[in-house]
Image (cartoon, helix red, strand yellow):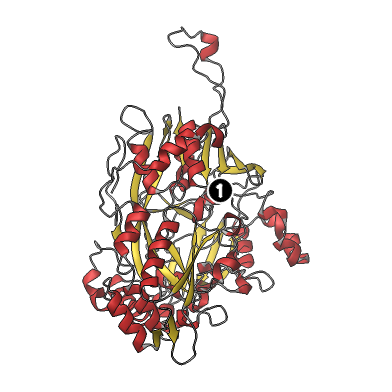
Amino acid sequence: MLLGNDLSRPAGRRLLPGSPLTPRPLWLVATIGFVLLQACAAPQAPSSDGDAGRTTSSTEASAPRAPKRLTIGILQEPQTWAPWVTTTTAGGANQAAFLIKRTLTTQSQDGQLQPDLAATLPSLERGDWKVNSDGTMEQSWKINPNARWHDGQPVTADDFVFGFEIETHKDLPRSISPANGLISSARALDPQTLVLNLKSSTPLAGQMLYFPAPRHILGDVLATDPERFVNHDYWTTAFVGTGPYRLSGWEPGAYQEFTAFDDYVGGRPKIDTVIFKFLSDSNTLLANVLSGGVEVALPDGLSIDMAVELRGSWAAPGTGNNVITYNDGRYYYVEFQHRPEWAKPAAARDPRVRRAFYHSIDKEGVNLVETAGLGLLADSWITPDDARRPQFKDAIPEWSQDSNLATRILEDAGWRKGLDGVLVNSSTGERMESEIRVTNGQGHVKAMSVLAEGWRKVGAVVSEVPIPAARVSDQEYRSTFPFAGLSGYPLRYFEWESWRFSCATAAQADTRWNGHRDGYCSQSAEPSIMRLQGVLQDKDRTPLQAEIMSIILREDYAGPPLYWQVSPLVFAKGVTGPVAPRLGFYDGVYSGAAINLWDKS
């Protein structure tokens, strides 16, 4: 659903309905009062309009226009552009990557796959996509001859070969991109022809499997010193990419500046300079929106409560300012620690305990503080309007908020309350002293309190830990949490099970903690997850997906479902082009991916 100013609802796939709330919170009054203290002035382009009503001379009419500059506020600073590091979605830290990094394909804002650095998409009909008798596949990709690196050098097929070498190099941190699991080899037939051999048939074959890398910059470094390669400033301040913008400035802790790349294969962006300003928290971001210090607040910045309130004030009809709230396809769930070396108490690894805690959760309360009631409760990663939903009926775990039921399940698992009311394991004497960690954004801290309240009612001691801003991008810290956390990810239709629950994609030291943080690994589900990656037809995929879901959710209660996220996209008068992106089959689509199509008057 879209809720906005003079914006119609695009026909969308899996957009969920909701309804706005209208109470006026006290924080807005306080924020406005301190707006001048908190906000920093946005970089301003010189005015090109002149005095109202003045006649423009022919000389002025032919004068070059003033550069267009756009300031975007996000909460977390990106740390690296390296392929072996997962950039957290918290605070919008991954949004800037779409400006400077592109690969063979991308998704349009309506969720359709389209060529980017490739000239066309391979097809079975043309013969540049072949399925072999043994189930393996071969694709021939033609690189767009107009594709350029930001230093002006042509993008070649060999740059994609080099990118694959980086993804699979034994002396580099292991990446968990689909390239590792799906591609057996990459070779360049000529500068414009890339041939990928895939280990099996897979519906993921057309998507952005990995990114190219400039061999002319990094080839000698990797060949001589892999450790220097990992720590090369190319991956931070000296990055040379292929996207519509190039990195032109980076003041750590303050901002990144991106300049339009004239030779981007998709055409020069309409806005000349984009500033990503790093702000400390949602209140500071809000203050900057109100003062004009930033012109756009991307999703994962402002809370939905703030956005709803802005729509009735700052973005009221006639102001020209805009607030869109939309269901973005992100599925939120509780993640429990599954690794024995980190799980404290060890009960986090017991499906019975996870089931009991699931029944203690007030999902309505979580949805209210996270989405202002605009989202929908989730009972699985199958959306309520999915036509295949009846086939998943027996795989979806039952849920009700029932503390008495939770207590009975805990007692059957050997946990009973002591004299102080705290659960104690009857076999080991271990107390149920747990911890929840969440990022300090959206309504996550409030949601953490709702979760904690339910767990305390059944006898758990719960420590509520907002993750410090300085540690949001610390993947080791994020992956070694002791008991539980809150996770949300866009529903990747073709790779959800392998991406979020496969043993092969669990975060660990040799991936620099890149991967799913909870470390879930099921020997029962893993063979089916691996098999699913090679199944092309929905009629064959759906029963296998239901089997996997039954193991993960109904048997293991790994990742108990909570809600479907609603995101706000806020932009000031004069900014045109932002729309609510639609979830595609291949990947989550972020609003920042299309900044090169935006404009500013």
- In front of the other: 69 or 111: 69
Quadrant for residue 212, please give it.
bottom right
Mark 1, Cα crowd under 10 Å, few <14 / some 14-19 / many 20+, is some
Relative to 507, 495 lies left or right: left
Q: Looking at the rendering, in which quadrant would you find the C terminus?
A: top left
Q: Which amino acid, by three-letter code, is at mark 1?
A: Pro
Quick check: can you spot residue 182?
A: yes
Task: Write the residue at 39% across / 81% down.
Answer: 353
Return the residue found at the far right: 224
Relative to 45, 534 lies left or right: left
Question: In the image, residue 493 lies at what x, y percent?
Answer: 37, 65
Quadrant for residue 419, please give it.
bottom left
Task: Write the residue at 32% across / 55% down.
Answer: 368
Relative to 300, 317 lies left or right: left
Question: In the image, residue 335 lies at what x, y percent?
Answer: 44, 70
- In front of the other: 478 or 39: 39
Q: Is residue 180 above or below residue 122?
A: below
Q: Is residue 325 above or below residue 225?
A: above
Q: Is residue 205 above or below residue 433?
A: above
Question: In the image, residue 110 lies at what x, y percent?
Answer: 35, 49
Return the residue found at the far bottom: 427
Pointer 1: what residue?
145
Question: In the image, residue 116 lies at what x, y percent?
Answer: 49, 50
What kind of element bears circle 1?
Answer: loop
Quick check: can you spot residue 491?
A: no
- In front of the other: 534 or 575: 575
Task: Write the residue at 47% across / 33% down.
Answer: 33
Quadrant for residue 4, please give it.
top left
- In front of the other: 457 or 545: 457
